[in-house]
Image (cartoon, rainbow, N blue to C red):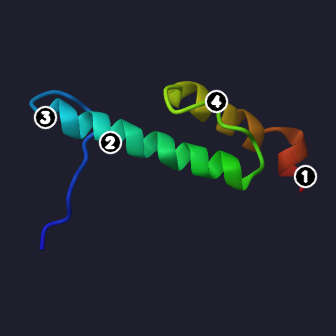
Amino acid sequence: MKPIEFPLFLEGQDTTRAAYAVFLLNKDLEQLLNFIGVKSLGPRYVLANLKELLRTIFSADFIDT
């Protein structure tokens, strides 16, 4: 059985599948933010959530724990 793929690019792809891939990526980011105790900025802010995740995990407070 071939695994289902959800590409994060639009070239030659169904835009619905690409949009769903971005949705899944953001859900992953929200779960990671929740796990480390940081509030997500919302479902429409994929890059902002990624920035917040990286800012938090690379902060001195997080690295020292």
Disc 1, SS: loop
The answer to which quarter of the image holds residue 19 is top left
Circle number at residue 41 = 4
Lower position in the chain sequence, tag 4 or tag 2: 2
Residue at the (12%, 74%) spot, across then down: 1
Q: Which of 2 and 41 is in front in this view?
A: 41
**Could you tell which of marks 1 and 3 lies nearer the N-terminus?**
3
Earlier residue among tags 1 and 2? 2
**Marking on residue 21:** 2
The answer to the question of whether label 1 and label 3 lie on touching residues, with beta carbons closer than 8 A, is: no
| Residue type, label 2 | Ala
Outermost residue on the bottom side: it is: 1
Q: Which one is in front, 10 or 39?
A: 39
Q: Distance between the residues labelled 2 and 3?
A: 11 Å
- The residue at 20%/35% (across/down) is 16
Please give left or right for residue 35 compared with residue 6 in the image.
right
Q: Tell me the quadrant of the picture where the C terminus can be found.
A: bottom right
Mark 1 residue type: Asp
Q: Where is residue 8 in the image (x, y as percent from the top left)?
A: 30, 37
Estimate the spatial distance between the alpha carbons at disc 4 and disc 2, rounded to whole Å.
19 Å
Kindly check if marks 4 and 3 are in contact, taking CB atoms under 8 A apart as contact.
no
